[in-house]
Amino acid sequence: MDKTTPAYSLRDIVIYFLKLGTWGFGGPVALAGYMHRDLVERKGWISEEDYREGLALAQLAPGPLAAQLGIYIGYVHYKVPGATLAGLAFVLPSFLMVLALGYIYTLWEGIPWMQAVFYGVGAAVIGIIAMSAYKLTRKSIGTDKWLIGIYLLSAIYTVWYETENVWLFLGAGVLYWLVKSPPKRFWLPGRGTAPSLLLLPALQSAGATASGGTLWKILLYFTKAGAFVFGSGLAIVPFLYGGVVKEYGWLNEQQFLDAVAVAMITPGPVVITVGFIGFLVAGFPGACVAAFATFFPCYLFTVLPAPYFRKYGKHPGIKAFVDGVTAAAIGAISGAVIVLGKRSLTDAWTIGLALVTALVLYRFKKIPEPLIILLAAVIGILLKTIKGAL
């Protein structure tokens, strides 16, 4: 595709991400899959190569994967304005939803029905994520033995440690680069990540010496959350738990679990749970500060390295590096399906619902995911009601 004459306007891409932020259920894996399906396969707006570069950069830099991939896709043809508007359009719908849910939550002093909804939705989400991971794996890994090995190693690591490791992604990229396109002279394929890595010590130091009001603490803490957590939105949950519940005591255990449930049953990036947490801690200002502090670092860590990926991405060494990182990234995403499944699939009913969801999506590819989420929510409420009556 000729990158100088995109097949879509800036308005088109903004409208697409507004829709994805409104209807895109399933977390980072599913959202990445939707972008590939819609923008690469169906519309042809973004090339497969550009998508793979964006996915690799999203895994290399800290921050939520789906939001960074969306920002990079906005950057592909419309540079900084495209990246900025695509990112805002993607995050805004789910942010407004968690604000509304936060208001209802504080008004009703808890939302017991949400646990029933999450009981069904969480199981269906596992099925949706599993199918997205399956499609990404088939599309990107192929039959290359090195890529298969990298994919399996990354998946096993993610399942075993229940986290993602940026050094594993970097190592995978360097390994595949050396195997497929050994350098004749020294080349630094990961140089685009340098700005983000150089900022980490400064942010960590700022967090250690911070003092002041609650909003200032929220700003510093969630900036660290956005700057230090790599990979999918799932990775930020244990980090937030350690600070929000253990360190600062802003929320209790049940409130934190409810916040995670809100993120899972709303569309858009899972990391939007920070808006709900910020609302519970300090109202509307707290929600705005928490969301800005979490997403702004990932915006910078995507836009700053993007020119290097755009300029050097066709070099054989860079291409091999990106292929290796992509294989590790998809392996981590597949491993995250298992990690999340262990927490969401708690009995025979949820396991069955997840399997049925995956089979339905495999057999009927045009069924909209929001319809499946709605049906799963109704099933969850019915099952919890029946269990409560027994």
Image (tube, rainbow, N blue to C red):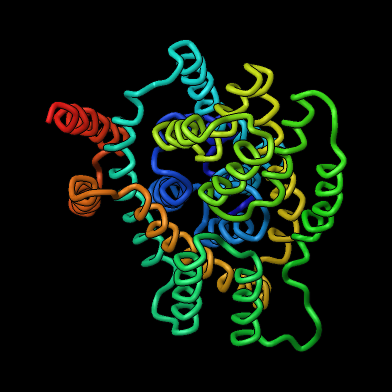
In the displayed structure, does residue 181 sit left or right of residue 362? right
Camera-side residue of 247 and 175: 247
Residue at 83% x, 44% y: name it: 208
Is residue 44 visible to us here? yes
Q: Quadrant of the C terminus?
A: top left
Height in image: 165 above or below 292? below
Q: Position of residue 182 (x, y in %)?
A: 68, 87
In the displayed structure, does residue 196 sit left or right of residue 87? right
In the displayed structure, does residue 18 sit left or right of residue 299? left
Residue at 52% x, 56% y: name it: 47
Q: Position of residue 247 (x, y in %)?
A: 68, 40
Is residue 364 visible to us here? no
Residue at 23% x, 54% y: name it: 362
Quarter occupied by residue 383: top left
Q: Position of residue 27 (x, y in %)?
A: 44, 44
Residue at 47% x, 73% y: name it: 151
Q: Quadrant of the N terminus?
A: bottom right
Height in image: 157 above or below 217? below
Q: Residue furthest top?
A: 107
Q: How many marks?
A: 0
Quarter occupied by residue 264: top left
Camera-side residue of 375 and 388: 388
Q: Position of residue 25 (x, y in %)?
A: 39, 38
In the displayed structure, does residue 357 sit left or right of residue 250? left
Camera-side residue of 252 and 307: 252
